[in-house]
Image (tube, rainbow, N blue to C red):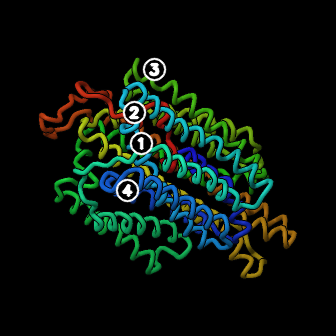
Amino acid sequence: MLVLGFDLTILNVALPAMGRQLGAGTGQMQWIVDAYIVVFAAAMLPAGLLGDRFGRRRLLVAGLAVFLAASLLGGLADDAGWVIAARTLMGLGAALVTPLALSVIPSLFADESERTKAVGIITASVAGGMPLGPVLGGWLLDHFWWGSVFLVNVPLAALGILVCLTLLPESRDESAPHVDVFSAVLSVAGLGSLVFGIIEGPARGWSDAYVIAALAASPVLLAALVLRERRVERPMLDLKLLARPAFARNAFTATLITLVLAGLLFVLPQYLQAVLGVDAFGTGLRLLPLMAGLLVAARGSGPLAARFGSRPVISAGLVVLAFAAFLGARTDVGDGYGLTATWLTVTGFGVGFAMVPAMDGALAALPAAQAGSGSGLLMTVRQTGAAIGIAALGSLLSGTYAAKLATEGLPAGAADAAGDSVIAAHAIAGKLNSQALAASADAAFVDGMTQVLSVCGVAALAAAVITTLLPDRGHVQIPEAEAEAVEGDGKTRGSPRPEVGGGPGSLPVPGA
């Protein structure tokens, strides 16, 4: 899980360098990030069922092996298309590892106190990998080529395979339901079509036949998935859980925060490296205020929620997040890092105070018998939010940048390349010795970032209002066997809290 923790944030620092050396535009960089997330989100549910049925250790080792092979492919690739293919395979490997790394714990630790410590160690591994990822990635990029951020996964994944084979006993659940292959295909196709349409719309044009077909096919495919899942006795994606008001409200909040955070982590490294001229290692260091604010708030949110209830803490966190986004939207081309560090720190506070109680409330609203399927649904919905966040906010950035960039007087080929990304524009400006193009690219990018941050601020404020006004209870009839008296603040009575997530280690990372 430490490997996955690194991988959640290390790539964001590498994107500008990859864009320069591979000639990748904004759309391709979006796909490098989103290919991983789309496959991860769609494959995680069937992966858990496959492990239950055919052996958790076997599938965990297979997931690590796929992740290792894909990291090798990514590190040795010399084309953006191959990097996207590698990221797709890495998403599949991560989808196998994430649920199974947690599901093997009960077979290893029968004692409840030891089991709790084990869950804490795993979640701490992911949390620890997050802030270390940008720093490690920056150091690697300053000393080696961009492929090193992929190859660093290889020895860690190999060590994980060795440990699993020598120390981990095999376990399975013979009563696990069959994996519905058709449902899995519908989920991948539906989500992939949506992301394709959003990412490719600004580049191809919204009237392009492929874009229209993708955006039209997505709701049809996802609706077919919902209808199919409602008919089966033991669904892979138990959508009935969304009828629980506390679960639905907190899942919505967690998903929106994940969407905003994923979009910011896509935009920020490009701003720091292209506009402020910071190197890769410096970019990693300059992202640490976000992680620091997040970690501090994550630890403090629990006591505050216990004292005042989770809903006020979540709403306040969302308001803080909105304030940070609007503060960041005031960034000008001439501003240094000081303003960015300020709003990044405030963003971390807002995310930490809102996300942890929201995750805790969503998991606590689940009946004990549905803790596994409910956790899977929550993680899938969050990853969907991350994919849509990168696609939508990245497309908004790309469209604004292309519209504002001044390319008069440039050759047609150079103008088209400069319009792909601010990184490409700076490369062309350097070749042509054009300070005017570099200045226009910086101004156009900052305008696009302002639009992105403004949308994030409005979305956070809307979520705060919805969180405050949504009812605690609905008119859904819950069978007595699983009734759990959901309290107004998202806590439950009468059943143990699910073991996965909900604590300080359950940090809001894009990809977990």
- Tag 4 residue: 47
Say which of 499 and 384 sits in front: 499
Nearer-N-terminus badge (4/1): 4
Q: Secondary structure at mark 1?
A: helix
Of circles 3 and 2, which is in front? 2
The x and y percentages for residue 112 are: 37, 27
Residue drawn 55% across the image and 50% down it: 162
Task: Classify 10 Å Cα crowding around label 3: few (below 14), some (14-19), many (20 and above).
Answer: few
Q: CA distance from mark 1 to mark 3?
A: 26 Å
Along the line of sight, the residue nearer the viewer: 228 or 147: 147
Q: Residues within 10 Å of mark 1 (few under 14, many from 20)?
A: some
Amino acid on which the number 4 mark rests in the picture = Ala
**Marks 1 and 2, how far apart at CA:** 12 Å
Q: What is the x, y in percent for residue 226?
A: 25, 60
Q: How many angstroms separate mark 3 from mark 2 (CA)?
A: 28 Å
- Residue position for label 1: 102
**Which quarter of the figure has residue 335?**
top right
> Residue 220 appears at what percent x and percent y?
29, 69
Sooner in the amino-acid sequence: mark 1 or mark 3: 1
The residue singled out by tag 3 in the image is: 303
